[in-house]
Image: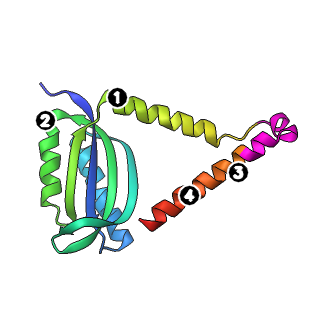
């Protein structure tokens, strides 16, 4: 008997393709998962990145992270599809553990709280809130600089 579980899959698509073609490949993968009983939870497009080593004489790949729910007996079928899809350079599908789900949910709520504007009463008379805003801006700029240098 197959059990419905939550999985995550990272797919590396050939970055030499046009953006429209990459979107078509992503859509093709998600439709295939849905046609085989899967439910897509989220799709994260990480973008074009340099590969650690050449794969099929390609040095760059477009990374996509897909979280989906599916029956355990359909995973080999999805894996086979990803192997046969010639635009997919590599892929990895794993069960998403409960600890990771809880951690990501906690992190998302914390980030949501940080992004919320503070009430006007606190901001008016306090220089600390301005310092916190400046510190958050500096942190965001640092993160952007780090990701731009990669």
Which residue sits at x=65%, y=53%? 137
Residue 73 - label: 2
Disc 2 to disc 3: CB gap under 8 Å: no
How many C-alpha atoms fall within 10 Å of the one at disc 2: few (<14), some, or many (≥20)? few
Q: Give the mark toward the camera: 3 or 1.
A: 3
**First of labels 2, 1 by sequence position:** 2
Q: CA distance from mark 3 to mark 4?
A: 12 Å
Observer able to see residue 4: yes
Q: Where in the figure is residue 69, as x and y percent of width and height?
A: 29, 36
Q: Which quadrant is the N terminus positioned in?
A: top left
Disc 3 to disc 1: CB gap under 8 Å: no
Q: Is residue 122 magenta?
A: yes
Observer able to see residue 37: no
Which residue sits at x=27%, y=47%? 9
- Residue range in magenta is 119-131
Q: Which residue is mark 4?
A: 142
Q: CA distance from mark 2 to mark 4?
A: 44 Å
- Quarter holding residue 41: top left
Indicate how the structure is coloured in the image.
rainbow
Q: Where in the figure is residue 143, as x and y percent of width and height?
A: 52, 56
How many C-alpha atoms fall within 10 Å of the one at disc 4: few (<14), some, or many (≥20)? few
Give the secondary structure at mark 1. Answer: helix
**First of labels 2, 4 by sequence position:** 2
Disc 3 to disc 4: CB gap under 8 Å: no
């Amino acid at each position: 008997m197959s059990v419905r579980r939550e999985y995550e899959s990272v797919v590396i698509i050939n970055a030499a393709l046009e953006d429209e073609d990459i979107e078509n490949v992503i859509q093709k993968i998600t439709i295939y998962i849905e046609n085989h009983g899967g439910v897509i939870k989220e799709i994260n497009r990480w973008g074009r990145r340099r590969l650690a080593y050449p794969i099929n004489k390609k040095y760059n790949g477009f990374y996509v992270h897909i979280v989906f729910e599916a029956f355990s007996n359909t995973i080999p079928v999805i894996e086979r599809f990803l192997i046969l899809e010639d635009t997919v350079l590599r892929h990895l599908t794993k069960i998403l553990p409960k600890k990771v789900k809880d951690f990501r949910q906690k992190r998302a709520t914390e980030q949501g709280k940080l992004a919320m504007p503070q009430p006007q009463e606190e901001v008016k008379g306090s220089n600390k809130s301005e310092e916190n805003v400046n510190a958050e801006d500096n942190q965001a700029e640092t993160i952007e600089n780090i990701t731009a240098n990669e």
